[in-house]
């Protein structure tokens, strides 16, 4: 499934960051996504990340932000101030903090104190799998994404736009399934009518 052009979603990850000092440099490090967690969008609707979801996207120009705010840039892969890699656990990142940036230093201190320790990432869906379960719930697995940004967040909650998009996805799937069912029923009725006419 392709997401709407120009529309980005966010995905939340209840993992922890840490503040690290290496000589004169300060870093914020941690996992921006994990492959083992299942995250609830709303009751009965879950989402998870496939271990290959980030294949081919880490070479792109990705930003590190505060709370998805594009004006609050902490680092950037193109500038070498953000490094990202994937391992068996998830998407790991390291942000080299700019000591002359008060917003970055304030965040570093909050991470160091444990006041801010969670994350999210912004992306477009390139491919995904949808599973309807026997209990009536639905589960999406992100198979491939276009990664735009990773964020240190105060509250790791899905943005309203992301939940709305998922609800829209689900409504569209249900409508397509219903339309396909109606088409099949119409075809059966037409075939039955033809067979009845031929038998006379």
Image (cartoon, rainbow, N blue to C red):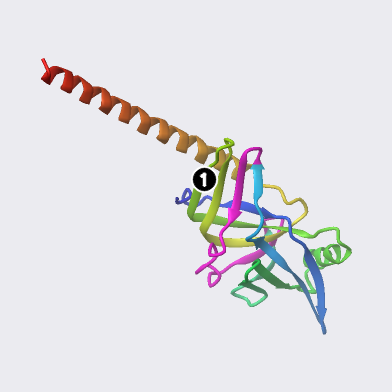
Q: Using the rendered image of the protein, determine whether residue 169 is visible from the camera's viewpoint.
A: yes
The answer to which quarter of the image holds residue 196 is top left
State whether residue 47 is above or below residue 110.
above
The region drawn magenta spans: 42-70
The reply, left or right, for residue 183 in relation to residue 120 is left
Residue 10 painted magenta: no
Residue 46 located within the stretch drawn in magenta: yes
Image coords of residue 12 (percent x, y): 67, 53
Q: Residue at x 79, y 63 (%)?
A: 103
Residue at point 64% right, 43% down? 41
Which image quadrant for residue 198? top left
Q: Is residue 85 above or below residue 164?
A: below
Left or right, 18 with reference to 149? right
Q: Residue at x 57, y 64 (%)?
A: 51
Question: Which residue lies under the disc numbered 1?
Answer: 131
| Residue most extreme to the bottom | 23
Coordinates of residue 22 in the picture (x, y in percent): 80, 82
């Amino acid at each position: 499934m392709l997401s709407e052009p120009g529309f980005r979603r966010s995905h939340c990850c209840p993992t922890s960051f840490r503040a690290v000092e290496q000589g004169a440099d300060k870093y914020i490090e941690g996992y921006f996504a994990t492959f083992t967690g299942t995250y609830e969008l709303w009751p009965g609707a879950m989402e998870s990340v496939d271990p290959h979801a980030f294949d081919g996207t880490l070479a792109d120009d990705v930003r590190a932000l505060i709370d998805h705010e594009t004006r609050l840039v902490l680092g950037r892969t193109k500038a070498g101030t953000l490094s990202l890699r994937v391992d068996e656990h998830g998407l790991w990142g390291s942000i080299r903090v700019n000591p002359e940036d008060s917003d970055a230093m304030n965040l570093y201190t909050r991470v160091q104190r444990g006041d801010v320790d969670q994350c999210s990432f912004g992306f477009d869906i390139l491919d995904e799998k949808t599973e309807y379960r026997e209990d009536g719930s639905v589960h999406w697995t992100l198979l491939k994404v276009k990664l735009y940004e990773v964020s240190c967040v105060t509250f790791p909650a899905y943005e309203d736009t992301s939940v709305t998009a998922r609800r829209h996805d689900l409504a569209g799937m249900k409508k397509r399934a219903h339309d396909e069912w109606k088409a099949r029923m119409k075809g059966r009725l037409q075939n039955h009518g033809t067979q009845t006419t031929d038998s006379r």
